[in-house]
Amino acid sequence: MGVIIVKDGTGEEVASLSGGEANTTNNRMEITAAIEGLKLIPELTNVRLVSDSSQYIIKTLSEDWSRNKNHDLWAVLDDLTCRHIMSYQWVKGHSRNNFNNRCDKLAVEAAKRIKGW
């Protein structure tokens, strides 16, 4: 997973992080990225969560898509989103969005570390 926290309005990068787990799924890592990013942000902050996760996270949070799996992570994410003023944006993966491309690079590097590549 890769996360970049950007100060809205300025485009200033405040923080970035990456990580992962062995034997997991892409969906779990996408949810975990959102969780870990929100943990870094003070409560009651206006947050725009941007993701390229095949609209999985964005539609689940903003349009109440069904949650058939990962209930443990969704419960944590729901708790964190309630602590902020949230908006959501989906971006196409591997597009010209520099922050998204950098998040992808952070995630790939973390996966390589975990797999010992």
Image (cartoon, grey):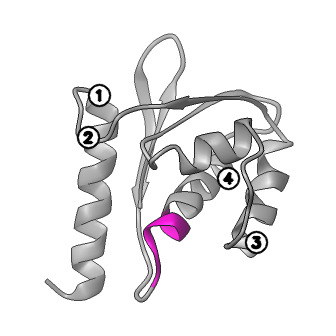
Circle on res. 39 = 4
**Which residue has dot 2 on it?**
101
Residue 28 falls within the magenta-colored stretch: yes
Crowdedness near tag 4: few (<14), some (14–19) or many (≥20) residues, C-alpha within 10 Å: few
**Which residue has dot 3 on it?**
71
Which stretch did the figure color magenta?
A: 24-29
Secondary structure mostly seen in magenta is helix
First-in-chain label (4 vs 3): 4
In three-dimensional space, the C-alpha distance between marks 1 and 4, rounded to whole angstroms, equals 23 Å
First-in-chain label (2 vs 4): 4
Label 4 vs label 3, nearer the camera: 3
In three-dimensional space, the C-alpha distance between marks 1 and 2, rounded to whole angstroms, equals 6 Å
Q: Quadrant of residue 11?
A: top left
Q: Residue at x 71, y 69 (%)?
A: 68
Amino acid type, residue under disc 3 in the picture:
His
Dots 4 and 3: beta carbons under 8 Å? no
Compare residues 93 and 11 and report the one nearer the observer: 93
Does residue 89 appear to the left or right of 111 in the view shown? Answer: right
Q: Secondary structure at mark 2?
A: helix
Does residue 58 appear to the left or right of 55 in the view shown? Answer: right
**Which residue has dot 1 on it?**
97
Name the image quarter holding the C terminus.
bottom left
Dots 1 and 2: beta carbons under 8 Å? yes
Name above or below for residue 116 compared with residue 95: below
